[in-house]
Image (spheres, rainbow, N blue to C red):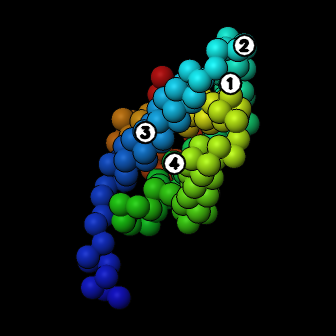
């Protein structure tokens, strides 16, 4: 078991926060771009669809993604190792959810299971909160040293975000 632990690529927690930020940014931008191209298929009520997707994405961020990203940041800060395994920025449940969502999105697009008009709305609405959530990881990556020094362990994320800014 010790050999396996030595072979696992470990990274500092600060780097792990930036890796998580990059993954979330990439996924968010990718969904926004795909959604935008799917909007290009039809121009009917384009402003309403895009506006509704943006509002929906912001609401979805506030209701769900903000909490999920805060929990994942807290999880990274609380990992027992100083150099945890590079893929530990997500827990198993998050990896399973990500796999199911990616698979269903790809299959829906490939086999036209959902009309592109509606799929574009879903993609854009999901891409926005992913991208917004990535900024939390960037924030905690940039201020990692300052936060660890001042608070030792980060528990109250919202209070600290206001304090640093």
Q: Residue 31, position in %: x, y?
A: 53, 35
CB within 8 Å, label 2 to label 4: no
Q: In front of the other: label 2 or label 4? A: 2
Q: Residue 81, position in %: x, y?
A: 38, 66
Name the residue nearer the viewer: 28 or 106: 106
Q: Name the secondary structure under disc 3.
A: helix
Residue 111 appears left or right of 33: right
- Are there few (<14), some (14-19), or many (20+) residues within 10 Å of tag 2? few
Q: Earlier in the sequence, mark 2 or mark 3?
A: 3
Q: Kindly identify the residue that appears in the image at 26 percent across and 76 percent down.
A: 7
Residue 7 appears left or right of 143: left
Q: Earlier in the sequence, mark 1 or mark 2?
A: 2
- Are there few (<14), some (14-19), or many (20+) residues within 10 Å of tag 1? many
| Marking on residue 53 | 1
Reading the image, the residue beneath label 4 is 73
Q: Residue 27, position in %: x, y?
A: 48, 41
Name the residue nearer the viewer: 21 or 112: 112
Reading the image, the residue beneath label 2 is 45
Quadrant location of residue 141?
A: top left
Distance between mark 1 and mark 3 Cα atoms: 19 Å
Residue 50: tell me if it is visible.
no
Residue 100: tell me if it is visible.
yes
Q: Kindly identify the residue that appears in the image at 67 percent across and 11 percent down.
A: 47
Reading the image, the residue beneath label 3 is 26
């Amino acid at each position: 078991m010790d050999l396996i632990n030595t072979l696992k690529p470990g990274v500092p927690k600060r780097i792990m926060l930036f890796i998580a930020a990059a993954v979330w940014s990439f996924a968010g931008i990718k969904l926004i771009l795909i959604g935008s191209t799917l909007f290009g298929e039809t121009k009917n009520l384009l402003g309403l669809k895009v506006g509704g997707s943006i509002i929906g994405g912001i609401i979805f961020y506030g209701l769900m993604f903000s909490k999920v990203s805060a929990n994942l940041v807290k999880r990274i800060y609380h990992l027992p190792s100083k150099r945890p395994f590079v893929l530990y920025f997500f827990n198993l449940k998050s990896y399973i959810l990500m796999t199911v969502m990616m698979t269903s999105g790809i299959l829906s697009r490939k086999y036209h299971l959902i009309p592109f008009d509606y799929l574009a709305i879903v993609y854009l609405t999901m891409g926005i909160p992913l991208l917004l959530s990535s900024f939390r990881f960037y924030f905690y990556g940039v201020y990692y040293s300052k936060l660890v020094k001042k608070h030792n362990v980060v528990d109250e994320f919202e209070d600290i975000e206001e304090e640093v800014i």
